[in-house]
Image: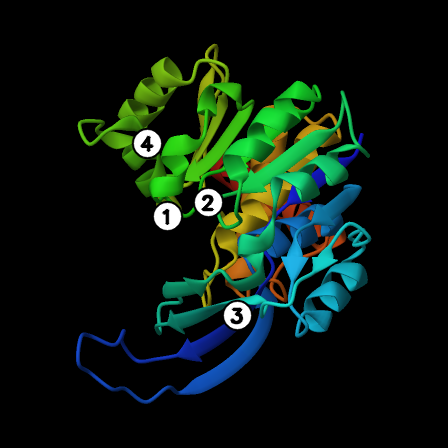
């Protein structure tokens, strides 16, 4: 089974700040870093580090060599990526002392993903393969439709939420992976709490398996038959920029490898916890050995705590 990610490729310009700049305010950054990023790139790297076979498709500018190198170093197949004359996409990211962020994105070459290019890429894939998409490139509605026509499993992370999303036929999507804010936007403003969001989305998009990330409250899985929650694992957050992308990549890699949904969710939650304890989105993504080791240690500690309680 191959995973094709037609996704964004960005250069992240990250500023560590005491507080977010307000309108008309100039602030001094405590530190600056330049990293490879974009939801597409981050998710491909997470998939590869989780052990999945992933091909990335998308567009970079003449300045995109660093992005191709980062993907290749992680084990992502890059031969489908095309170079555009427009500069690569980039993001300006403010990170506060709590590790939370505010992000402004410039699409750049990500906007040059054309229907003809999508058709060309999809000739290499078919039934049994997975198509992963985010909402940071052009012609996402077309990619969803063509992926469904090819018999691929369509996975969509509808971020960022914008007007382009209205043209996407989400009834064709097999997995919707999104955060609570995005879920509420799609479900409608009258949806209350995770349960309300899941219920509304389930009615609107009955085909889709829903994975809803809830920040410090963990995550939720719903497939129309079962619904369950996965708690977060403790972590000292220094940068949450790539947490959701790490979660998405590890969850999908788990599903592709045949893991049960509950196991894939746990796997993804631990990977995400490790990622927030590190600086940079892509650099912070752990490999599968790290995740398995931390999970084994957590389970051992949990068993020891249970044993101590029984002794008492």
Of the residues under marks 3 and 2, which one precedes in the sequence? 3
Pick the residue in front: 29 or 55: 55
Q: Which mark is residue 216?
A: 1
Q: Give the x, y percent position of residue 255.
A: 67, 29
Identity of the residue drawn at 68% across and 69% down: 64
In this view, 260 is above or below 276: above
Pick the residue in front: 290 or 300: 290
Corner quadrant of residue 195 = top left
Q: Which residue is mark 4?
A: 186
Of the residues under marks 3 and 4, which one precedes in the sequence? 3
The answer to whether residue 44 shows anywhere in this view is yes
Q: Secondary structure at mark 4?
A: helix
Could you tell me if the residues under marks 1 and 2 are in contact, i.e. CB atoms within 8 Å? yes
Could you tell me if the residues under marks 3 and 1 are in contact, i.e. CB atoms within 8 Å? no
Q: Give the x, y percent position of residue 44.
A: 67, 50
The answer to whether residue 262 shows anywhere in this view is no
Of the residues under marks 3 and 1, which one precedes in the sequence? 3
Measure the C-alpha gap from mark 3 to mark 4: 27 Å
Could you tell me if the residues under marks 4 and 1 are in contact, i.e. CB atoms within 8 Å? no
Corner quadrant of residue 96 = bottom left
Measure the C-alpha gap from mark 4 to mark 1: 21 Å
Pick the residue in front: 177 or 275: 177
**Horizontal arrangement in the rendering, residue 201 relative to residue 65 (left or right):** left
Q: Which residue is mark 3?
A: 12
Q: Which mark is residue 232?
A: 2
Q: Nearer the viewer, mark 4 or mark 2?
A: 4
Q: Nearer the viewer, mark 3 or mark 1?
A: 3
Q: Give the x, y percent position of residue 200.
A: 30, 20
Measure the C-alpha gap from mark 3 to mark 1: 24 Å
Identity of the residue drawn at 17% across and 81% down: 24
Of the residues under marks 4 and 1, which one precedes in the sequence? 4
Q: Secondary structure at mark 2?
A: loop
């Amino acid at each position: 089974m191959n995973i094709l990610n037609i996704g964004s490729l960005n250069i992240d310009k990250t500023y560590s700040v005491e507080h977010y700049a307000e309108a008309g305010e100039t602030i001094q950054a405590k530190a600056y870093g330049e990293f490879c990023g974009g939801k597409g790139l981050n998710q491909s790297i997470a998939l590869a580090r989780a052990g999945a076979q992933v091909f990335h498709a998308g567009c970079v500018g003449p300045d995109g060599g660093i992005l191709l190198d980062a993907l290749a170093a992680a084990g992502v197949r890059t031969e489908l990526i095309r170079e555009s004359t427009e500069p690569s996409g980039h993001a300006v990211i403010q990170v506060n002392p709590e590790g939370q962020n505010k992000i402004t994105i410039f699409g750049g070459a990500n906007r040059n993903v054309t229907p003809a290019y999508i058709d060309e890429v999809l000739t290499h894939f078919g039934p049994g393969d997975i198509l992963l998409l985010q909402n940071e490139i052009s012609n996402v509605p077309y990619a969803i439709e063509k992926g469904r026509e090819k018999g691929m499993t369509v996975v969509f992370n509808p971020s960022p939420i914008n007007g382009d999303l209205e043209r996407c036929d989400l009834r064709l999507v097999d997995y919707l992976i999104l955060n609570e804010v995005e879920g509420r936007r799609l479900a409608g403003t009258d949806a209350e709490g995770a349960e309300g969001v899941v219920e509304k989305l389930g009615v609107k998009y009955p085909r889709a398996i829903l994975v809803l990330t809830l920040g410090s409250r963990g995550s939720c899985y719903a497939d129309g038959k079962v619904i369950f929650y996965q708690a977060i694992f403790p972590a000292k957050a220094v940068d949450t920029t790539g947490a959701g992308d790490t979660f998405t990549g590890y969850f999908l890699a788990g599903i592709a490898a045949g893991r049960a949904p509950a196991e894939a969710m746990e796997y993804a939650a631990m990977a995400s916890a490790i990622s927030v304890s590190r600086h940079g989105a892509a650099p912070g993504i752990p490999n599968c050995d790290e995740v398995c080791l931390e999970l084994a240690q957590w389970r051992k500690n949990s068993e020891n705590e249970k044993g101590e309680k029984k002794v008492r």
